[in-house]
Image (tube, coloured by chain):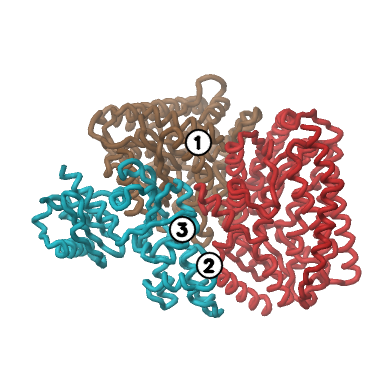
Amino acid sequence: MSYFAGIDVGSLSSDAAVIDQDGRLKGWSVTETGPHSTNAAEAALDAALTMAGLSRDELAFVVATGYGRAAVPLAGKKITEISCHALGAYSLFPDVGTVIDIGGQDSKVIRLGENGRVADFVMNDKCAAGTGRFLEVMAAKLGVGLNDLGRLSLAAGGEVSISSVCTVFAESEVVSLVAKNHPIDQVIKGLHRSVVNRVAAMTGNIGIKPRVIMSGGVAKNAGVVALMSERLGVDISVPEEPQIVGALGAALMAAREAK
Amino acid sequence: MSLSAKARMQFMKDLGFPAMLSLAKATKGKRKPRKANPDFGPPLKCAARLKEIMTRHYYLSRFAPGARPVAWVTSGAPVELLRAFDFYTIYPENHGALCGAQKMGPELCVAAEEEGYSPDLCSYARVDLGHFFSGKTPAGKLPKPDLLFCSNNICQTVVYWYKVLAHRLNIPLVLFDTPFNYGEITEANIAYMKDQILEMIPVLEKAAGKAFNMERFMRLAELSKSTSQLWGQCLETMQTRPAPMTIFDAFVHLAPVVSLRGLPVAQDYYEILLAELTDRVERGIGAITNEKKRLMWDNIAVWYKVRDFSELFAARGMNFVAATYTNAWAETIKHLDMSHPWESLAKTYSLVILNNNLEHRLGLMEKMVREYAVDGLVVHSARSCKPYSLGQYDLKRLLSHRLGIPAVVIEADITDYRFFSEEQALTRLEAFFEALEAA
Amino acid sequence: MSPAQLPSRGDYFKQWRGGGGKVCAVFPAQYPKELLWAHGVLPMEVWDPPLAPARAQGHLQPYICSVVRQGLELLLAGGMDEVGAILFPHTCDSLQNLASLVADYLEPPAPSLFFYNPKAPFAAAAKGFYVSQLQALEDDLALIFGPAPEGAMEQALEWSRRLSELYARAYARRAAGELGVGAAEFYRLLRAGEYLHPQDYIPLLEAWLNEAPAQGGPQGQGILLSGVLPSPPDLMETLDGLDLRVVHDDLLSMSRRLLYPPPGKGGPLEALADCFLAMPPCSTRGSSLSERLEWLGGLAQSGGAQGVVFSVVKFCEPELFDLPELRRGLKEAGLPSLVLEVDVNQEVGGQAATRLEAFGEMLS
C-alpha cells in the first residue's frame, strides 16, 4: 500500500491530509500556522501521520498548497490552492459545481469543469472585506469568541445593517452601534451579511453552478452558511471538515503525480 | 414611431397620469404629517409641484417607447439639439441621485459589481448599470433608449459608462467631445465643437426619423436659456440674509433644470419657485429660523445624507447658501446666443465648471464666497467623482488662506454609503463647527 | 547587448543634462514625441517612478491611482527640478486634474504644457483639431526651447519610423516564438524608449535584436497581457518564474502606441495626426467595446495566446469600465481571462502570484 499527503499552509491554519492509494482519508490535522511556515507544515503533516499511524518514510509523494506552499521543502510539488480545493471538493462531492472558500485572508469562488478541474475562478482583491480576517477583527472588537459567532447570529431576533465594507470603517461603525445599545447578536448577523454580500458579488463574475460547497474556516460558521444560501438561493453543502478540503485535494494531486 | 403608441402616450399624459395622481393624493391624506422641526422656516410650497412634475416625467417615460424616440443623456450634454427632435430624455445621473436619496445606492451598486464592475467605479454609473441588469428602480420602470447622448464636459467617466450601454443595447452613442480648457477657451476648441454639432445633426435625424428644424431648435434653445436663467435667479435669492432656501432644497429643486431643460414645464416651474422665493425675501422668511452662519458646498450632494446634514447644520444656525454644483446649470447659459447658435452652444457647454482648470474654479468660488457672504466652506470629497474631487485638498487650502474662512473636507460618496464613515465625517464636522463658531 | 548594459534613467538623465541637453517630463500616455525631438528636447516619460509615497498624500485622495500619485511624488520630491517643461497629455479625468493641480496650485519647477487628445468615435473634425493641437504645442515648445532647426522635424519622423519598425520586429519575433527572452527582459529593453533619445536608443535596440537568442524563454502557456503598463517589474518576473509566456500585449504604454509609425505622405503634422488616429483601440481614447474586443481577439490569435491577463492599475476608471464586457466577449470566444489589480509601486504579493499560477494550471 502506498500513501500520499497534502499540506495546505494557510495564513492562519496549516492543514494536512494523508490518503492511501485508493484515495481513502487515513489521517488529517488542522494546526495553527504561526510565524514559521516550514515548521507549521511539518507539524501539520506529523499530526496527520500520527492519526493515520504512519511515518514520513511511508509517503510516496507530498504536494504542498496554500499561501505558504513555497516554504515546504519536503513537498515534491507545489500546486495552488485553487486547483487543490477544486479536486478536494470533487472527491467529497462528485456532483460539485461550485466551491466557495472563505479563508483567513483570501476568499475564492471556483467553478468546476470535468473531473474536478478548474473551469473558472475568482479571488478577492487586496481587501480584508469578505474574508475570515474581517470576522476575526470584528469578533475581537465585540469581545466574542470566533466559534460563537455562528450560534449568536442564528439565534438573533433581528439584524442590524452594517453599511461600511472597509474593515477599518466597519470597526468604528460596530463600536458606535454597540454604544447605541444594538444587541450584539444582531450586529453579528449584520457583519455576516456583509461578508456574504461581498463574496456573493464575486460569484456574479463566474456564475453559480450547483451543487455548491463551502470550505475554509468560515464554512464552520453556520450563520454565514445560512445567509449565503439565502443570498444565492441555493442549498449549500459543507464537508465534515471544511478546513482540510485544500489539503485533501493536494494529497489527491500527490497520488496523481506518483502515477 | 407607431400611431397607437403615440395615442397611448397622449392618453396617459392627458388623463392617465392626472387620474393616478389624484388617487395618490386621496390615499396620501391619511398619512401622518411629519412633525415640524423648529430649526426650519416654513417649507417651500412648490415642493409638491416639483414632486408632481418629476413623478409625471418618470411615469410617462414608460409609455414613450414607440411613441417618441428615447435618449439617455448626460447632465452636461447640449440637450437643446435633442429637444428639436422631440426626444424623450432620461438622465441616468438624475436617476442615480434619486436612487441615492432613496438609499438604494448599495443595492444597485452590488447588482453591477456582480456583473464584474469594480466597486471603485463611479457610483452613478454602478447604480445605472445595476438598474440595467436588475430592473430595480424607485421610478417604476425606465424606457430603453434608442440613442445615447453623451458629453465629456463633466467627466470622461460618462464616455466609459455609456460605451457599456451602447455595447449591451447595440444602439448609437453620440459623443460631444469638449476639449478640457487648461487655460482660456481657444478658437480651435470652439471650431472643433461646432464641427461636431454639424456632424451629429444627420445622426440625430436618422435616429429620430425626422428632419432637423432650425427654427424649432432656436425657439427651444431660447426656452432652455430662460429656464437656466430663472434657475440662476432662484439661486441668487440666497444672497439675502436670511436666505429663503438652503442648498439642500436646491439639490432637490435642481431636477427640472437638469432633466427637463428646454421644455415649457421646467420654465413654468422656475417661475413659480422664483415668485415664492422673492415673496419669502420680501417677508424676511428664512429657510432656517436662526441663520447665524452662511456656508458653501463643493461637489455633488451626498444624496443619502441630504436630510440628516440639513438638520445637523440647521440645528446650529448654519445655512448652506451656495454650491458650485447647483450653480453649474445657471453659470454658463449667458453665452448662448442665437445669432451664433453653434459657436455659442459650444461655449455654453465647454465653459462649465468641470471642463475648466482649477484656477477657474478657485476664481469662481472666491466670487461666490463674496457674493453670498459665505462664512465657511464644506468640501465633499466624492469617491465617485475624480474630476470634481482631485485637487480639492489644495482648493480648500488656498481658498481658506486667501479668504480667511474655515473649511473642512469630508470623505464620502454620492450614492454608495458603504464607503462613508459617519463617525469620521462627524468628527471632522465637529472640529469645523468649533472653528466656525470661534471665528 | 544585454539589459544590464542599458543606462539607468537616472544616469542617462545626468549625462544628458551634463551635455547641456534639454528635457521635458511627460505624463502618460499618447503624445507627439516627434515634436519634442525636433526641438532638441528629450522626453522623459513619467509612468511609475519607484518612490515611497509621502508628499503626494497631502494633495491626493486615497482613491486616486498610483500612476498619478507616483508622478506627483516625483515632481514634489524634486525629480523635475531640472526639466525645461512638463507635458500633460489628456488621458483620463485624473491626469487631466493632475495637470491643472500642478499648473494652477502647486507652483511647478517648470512651465506646464498641455495636449488634448480627441476622443473616439473620431469626428471628421478630429484630424483638423489634432493638427491645431500640434501647432499650439509647437508654438509653446518654440517659446520655451527655441525653434526647431530646419530638417529636424523630418529627422524626428525618421527616428519614429525606425523605432516602430524595431518594436514591431521584437513583437513579431516574440509572437512567433523566436525570441528567447522572458517578459522581464523584453519590457526592460522596450521601456528604455521612455527615457532614451532615439539616437542612443536605436543602436541599442538594434544590437539587442541581433543578439537576442531565438530559444530559451518561458515555455508554458501563452498569454496576452492587457492593461496600462508592464509594471510593477516584479509582475514580469513573476510571469517568467511561473513559465507563463507573454506572446503579445495590449498595454497602453506599449503596443497601444508604439507599433504605429507616422505615414510617409503629407506634411509632418498631418502625418502625426494620421498616426494618432490610426493607433489601436484603447479605453482612454474612448474606443467602442466591439472594436476593442475584435482587436484583443486578433492579438491573442496572432501569438496563439490561450488566455488573457488584465493587469489593471487600481482605481483606473477607463480600464475598469471596459473589463466586464471584454471578459464576457473573450470568454464567448473561448479565451479565459484573469484580472490582477496592481499598484505601480508595490510588489505583486503572494496572493496575486497564486492567482497567476492557478490561471496557468487552469490553462494547461
Report which residue position mark 3 lands on. A229
In the depicted structure, whether residue B109 falls above or below residue B156: below
- The colour applied to the residues of chain A in this rendering is cyan
Classify 10 Å Cα crowding around label 2: few (below 14), some (14-19), many (20 and above).
Answer: many
Query: Does residue C44 show up?
Result: no
In the depicted structure, whether residue B286 falls above or below residue C141: below
Query: Which-is-in-front pick, marks 2 and 1?
Result: 2
**For the C terminus of chain B, which image quadrant?**
bottom right
Q: Quote the CA–CA distance across marks 2 and 1.
A: 54 Å
Q: Quote the CA–CA distance across marks 3 and 1.
A: 61 Å
User: Same chain for the residues at labels 3 and 1, yes or no?
Assistant: no
Q: Position of residue B217 (x, y in %)?
A: 83, 36
Classify 10 Å Cα crowding around label 1: few (below 14), some (14-19), many (20 and above).
Answer: many
Q: Position of residue B319 (x, y in %)?
A: 74, 70
Query: Does residue C249 show up?
Result: yes
Work out whether residue B343 or residue C223 is closer to the camera in this orientation and state it: C223
Report which residue position mark 2 lands on. A162
Could you tell me the amino acid type at mark 1?
Leu
Tell me, by letter, which chain the rendering colours brown. C
Label 1: element kind:
helix
Label 2: element kind:
loop
**For the N terminus of chain B, which image quadrant?**
top right
Report which residue position mark 1 lands on. C36
